[in-house]
Image (tube, helix red, strand yellow):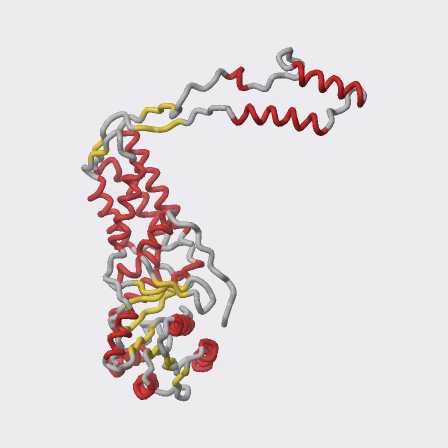
Amino acid sequence: MFGSLKEKLSKTVSKITEKIYSKGKAEKKPDVTKEAPPKEELKSTPVESKTEPYETKQIIKTETESGPGTEPKTEEKKKENKKVGFLDRFKITKTIKKVLGKDVVLTEDDIEEVLDEMELELLEADVAYEVVEKIIESLKEQLVGTKISAKDDPEEITINALKNAIRGILSQKSINIYDIIEEKKKLNEPAVFVFVGINGTGKTTSIAKLAYKLKEKGYSVVLAAGDTFRAGAIEQLEEHGKNVGVKVIKHQKGADSAAVIYDAIQHAKARGINVVLADTAGRQATNINLMDEIRKVVRVTKPDLTIFVGDSLAGNDAITQAEEFNRAVNVDGAILTKVDADAKGGAALSIAYSIGKPVLFMGVGQRYGDLQEFDVDWMINKLFGDDEEVKFSTEREF
């Protein structure tokens, strides 16, 4: 997951660190606690050596009993091998540690070439151009003019600077959907969440996963089959509803999407249901009629959250789609699907910054339970390898 982006960031850390050492005229010093023994003392003593009479006698005896030229018995071989291993365990090897010879103050010229290379590499990892520029600007602010002394760890300083830059990219104000639900419960009204996006991003499946998650937390949920355009969309949502154990409000194919969602809201109000999750038809921003329809849905239903669902594997296309939907209906947050299969990671890093809205959840597998709340620290740890690798299930539940 995010392997490409992680590799690019790692290269940048290495190159900037080398620049610091080079400018500080790094010296190589052995990092040892005591002097290593002479080379000859580490060699295993030959069998014929007079200093090992016991082993010599044993082997001679073995040859006499088993015949000349034959191998020693297994037990004797073990003793000999154990003796070599015992010596090996006490070998002291020198480890070379690079240290700064003097204090360093980086200039913009020192790291300009490295940052130019990083810009190209991050763009290759599907990081949006404005996000790349923001990261570079943040690195310059943190590193240029900073005094790095001989006691500092240049690699650690560089990593922390990159982490701070990425944290700034993902610093959009978070939204707690459970707080929204609780506030609506106090008013005896359902929380209404409308989902938008293009075809094939996993919108309907994400709705089912969120319904499952909300049910686990004790909330009652109803689904609205607002995608009346795509063939089989209503049946697909009904199948998910049956699997998760929630009711689906539907009209016939081709019906008005806003009317379907409005009826689902009225149903939830009448029965004291906590949450309405509304599906809508996938659409491209270039389809004027369908974009007018989604504007009408938002205008009529007045949802508490309008959530964009994007495919993280789409890279820069997902970022463009998020921007277009945000302009059309002012989305409140995003769900990224297929994050477990995302090798590049650029979309996950860029969408929140591009639309100025937070990522709420990530799809990390094919089971209903594989919807993870987005967390900035989790993302940073993934990119810099501070956490243990998480294994996601490929088992399907639908």
x%, y% of residue 328?
Answer: 26, 73
Indicate whether 14 appears above or below 38.
below
Query: Above or below — where is 240 with respect to 94?
Result: below
Vertical order, 162 against 296 (above or below): above
Is there any visible trace of residue 390 in the rendered image?
yes
Q: Position of residue 254 (x, y in %)?
A: 39, 86
Question: Which residue shows up at 32% across the image and 62% down it?
Answer: 319
Residue 332 figure quarter = bottom left
Q: How many marks?
A: 0
Name the residue at the front extreme: 54
- Taking depth in this image into account, of 381 and 323 the one nearest to the observer is 381
In this view of the protein, which residue sits in the foreground, 72 or 75? 75
- Determine whether, in the image, residue 342 is placed left or right of residue 117: right
Task: Judge left or right: residue 175 versus residue 75.
Answer: left
Residue 232 visible within the image: no
Q: Position of residue 123 (x, y in %)?
A: 33, 52
* Quarter-of-image position of residue 237: bottom left
Picture residue at 53% right of the left edge, 16% below the top: 41
Image quadrant in which the N terminus is located? bottom left
Q: Nearer the viewer, residue 236 or 34?
A: 34
